[in-house]
Image: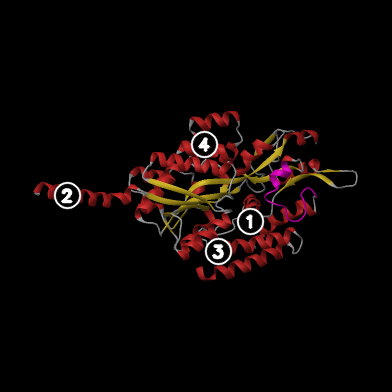
Amino acid sequence: MKHYLKSLGGAVSALALLASVSPALAVDISFYYPVAVGGPITKVIDGMAADFEKENPSIKVKPIYSGSYQDTITKVLTAVKGGDVPQTAVILSTDMFTLIDEDAIVPFDDLAKTDADKAWLKSFYPGFMENSQTGGKTWGIPFQRSTVVMYWNKELFKEAGLDPNKPPATWAEMVEMGKKLTKRDASGNVQTWGVQVPSSGFPYWLFQAFTTQNDVILMNQAGTETYYDKPAVVEALQYWVDLSTKHKIHPPGIVEWGTTPKDFFEKKAAMIWTTTGNLTNIKNNAKFDFGVAMLPANKRRGSPTGGGNFYVFKKSTPEQKEAVFKFAKFMTEPKRAAQWAIDTGYVAVSPAAWETPEMKKYVADFPAPLVARDQLQHAVAELSTHENQRVTKALNDGLQAALTGAKPAEQAMKDAQREAERILKPFK
């Protein structure tokens, strides 16, 4: 009987031990990823999540495809108020202040235990960290990051009598070349535009390329002030408007973000400005020789950075936060960051990723991705403030008013600035 009780006691204490250990054995994390369902990207993400689970059998990752970036932040903020929050998500780097203001996230620094963890936090390009850190803390981890680049059709350049290997390096050259590249039929209808810069979806982002090139910044680092009505900002907008109204080398009105790569494939536009995130898409679909270049300069070269960061949500358990830290670290390891960049066209987020054999081989055969990497030294932080959605909308509304001819550039920017100041007043 004594033996029986002893073994029963042992079994009970073993069970108690198991009970105390088992929560650590299986940690579930849900991961919002901004893409509409289906397509090759979801396969890549599913594959990466499965690889992570193989390496970390005690963690289950559930990717949830949450629509656009806009849909994702909306869903996350609704969940923060309602309780069913994911443990991690890839959300725009520019939504950092909003997520902090909503008390939705915790900084990664709090989870960095070892020297290796701390070194990892310092391993990313400084240009990407400008939108990932504030107040001395790291709130976001760069994952799918980008800059705006120019793609040009070398065949159309040849046909226009231009050097197919020499894209425009300045604003003046872009106008000059654009005039030679714009093709009209006998009735005067445009068949090919010289240049196309999309103004739906992310107008502020493309506009920030023009303002950076005109050597003016749109906001302060604390995210409490905007400078939409500065003369150099108005000048940059006037140049964009003039491409269409004065030089007639750019489509009039609002140009769709989503159809711009397609217009390029169909030779409806000889040069386009869009994200490096479109690189793999263009490489796979353009049936002609194309080039990728840094954006043309005016007073300087430049582009804003863009794209999404990993965040870790406050309402997660300590075990889940630890699991997210591991997952973000896994997803941004040099080898994986390189493969992700190859699969998608996003910029590999750390210098170490560019040193991997995979990346070296890829760029030896296809050097285009180096353009975005090299442009990082001319890049600025993407427009990001407190109340970011509303402050950005004020600018987008102003840009669209100017591009459609509803308001002169100066008036449009004055109105946008007044609205931004009203929204940001509580944060002063």
Looking at the image, how many numbered discs can be counted on the residues? 4
Residue 230, can we see it? no
Of the pair 188 and 105, the residue shown nearer to us: 105
Measuring 76% from the left and 56% from the top, which residue is drawn there? 253
Question: Where residue 377 is drawn, which disc sits there?
Answer: none
Measuring 56% from the left and 38% from the top, which residue is drawn there? 343
Residue that label 2 marks: 8
Start-end of magenta stretch: 248-264
Looking at the image, is mark 1 or mark 2 nearer the viewer? Answer: 2
Residue 287 position by quadrant = top right
Q: Is residue 285 magenta?
A: no
Secondary structure state at the residue bearing disc 2: helix
Q: Amino acid at mark 2?
A: Leu
Looking at the image, is mark 1 or mark 3 nearer the viewer? Answer: 1
Secondary structure state at the residue bearing disc 1: helix
For this orientation, the residue located farthest to the left is 2
Quick check: 58 left or right of 62?
Answer: left
Q: Upstream in the sequence, badge 1 or badge 3? A: 1
Residue 192 position by quadrant = top right
Residue that label 1 marks: 204
Measuring 60% from the left and 61% from the top, which residue is drawn there? 392
Residue that label 3 marks: 225
Of the pair 37 and 18, the residue shown nearer to us: 18
Q: Upstream in the sequence, badge 3 or badge 2? A: 2
Q: Upstream in the sequence, badge 4 or badge 2? A: 2
Quick check: 413 left or right of 140?
Answer: right
Question: Where residue 339 is drawn, which disc sits there?
Answer: 4
Looking at the image, is mark 4 or mark 2 nearer the viewer? Answer: 2
Give the Cα distance between marks 4 and 3: 38 Å
Looking at the image, is mark 4 or mark 3 nearer the viewer? Answer: 4
Give the Cα distance between marks 1 and 2: 69 Å
